[in-house]
Image (cartoon, rainbow, N blue to C red):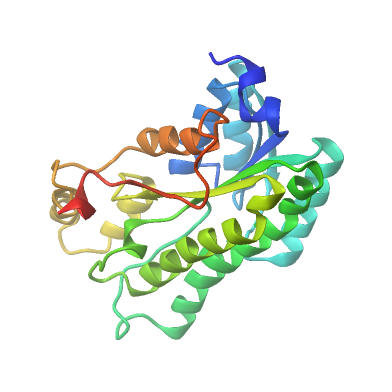
Amino acid sequence: MIAVENTVDGNYGVTVVTGGGAGIGQAICERLAEAGVHLVVADVNEEAATATAQSIEQRGGRAFAVALDVSDASSVERAADLIHRHVGRVGALVNNAGIGSAGTVLTTSTEEFQRILQVNVIGLFLVTKAFIPDMIEAGAGAIVNVGSIAGVVGIRDRAAYSASKGAVLALTRSLHADFHQQGIRVNAVVPGTVHTPWVERITANYANPDEAIAQMAQRQPIGRMGTPQEIAEAVWFLLSPANSFSYGSLLVVDGGMTAL
C-alpha cells in the first residue's frame, strides 16, 4: 500500500468519484482506496454507492457514500453540502458518471440526445463547479475526467454518446486553460471499449448479443476489451502527485484502437 503522505489525500484532501457505485467508477474507488485515498463514493444509485463504500471500509479504507444525480443541479448542491459538512474540503475529483446509448442521428430521439448530454456534459459541469472552489482556495487540486475514444474517432451507431464525450475532452482542455495557474491539474483518461455492465445492457438489445460483444472486442487490435481495473490504474496515475507534469492531457487507454 502506498503511504498516505504520498497520495492525493496527503496533498489535496478527500477525493470525490462520481458514478462510483459500479463498473469503472467502482474500480476507480477500489484502486484509490488501495493507495490510501480518503474517498467520497457518489452515485445516483445510493445503495450501490453505500455498498462500494462499505466494502472499502471493511478492508481498512476510508469512504463516505452519497447519493448524487450529476444531471440535477439541486442534487449536486445537496451532495456538496453533505460532503462539506461530514467529510470536509474536496481536493480531487474524478468525473466518471456517464450514460450511453446506441443510435445514429436518425434513430436517436431528441429527448435521448438531450438526456445523454445532460448527464455526460452538464453533469460534469455542475459537479466541477461545485467542488473546484475548494481547490482554488487551497491553491492545489486534481481533476480527472473520464472521456472515451468515441470523442476522438468516429464510432458507428453512437451519435449522442460520441458528441457528449467530444465535449468532455474539450471541456478538459478548457478547465486546464482556466485553472492551471491556481495549481489545479485537469486531465482526462480516454478509454477504448471496456467490458462493463453497460456493455451487457446495450448489447442485450441486439439480435445476437454474444456476436455484438465479440465485434466490440475485435475493434481493439489486441483482440479484447479493456477491464475497469485497467482504466482505474490510468486514473490513479493521472491523480497521483507523482504525475506532476501532466496538465490538460488526454491519456488514451484503448488497446491500440486509435493508433492504427
What is the quadrant of the C terminus in the image? bottom left
- In the image, farthest residue toward the right: 85
Quarter of the view holding residue 222: top left
Observer able to see residue 21:
yes
Rendered position, 80 above or below 205? above
In the rendered structure, the answer to whether residue 38 lies left or right of residue 213 reads right
Observer able to see residue 18:
no
Rendered position, 69 above or below 112? above
Task: Identify the residue shown where x is 57% and y is 41%.
Answer: 48
Residue 124 pos. (x, y %) = 59, 60
Residue 133 pos. (x, y %) = 77, 53
In the rendered structure, the answer to whether residue 189 lies left or right of residue 135 reads left
Task: Identify the residue shown where x is 20% and y is 46%.
Answer: 256
In this rendered view, identify the residue nearer to me: 151 or 41: 151
Residue 126 pos. (x, y %) = 67, 63
In the rendered structure, the answer to whether residue 149 lies left or right of residue 58 reads left
Task: Identify the residue shown where x is 73% and y is 33%.
Answer: 13
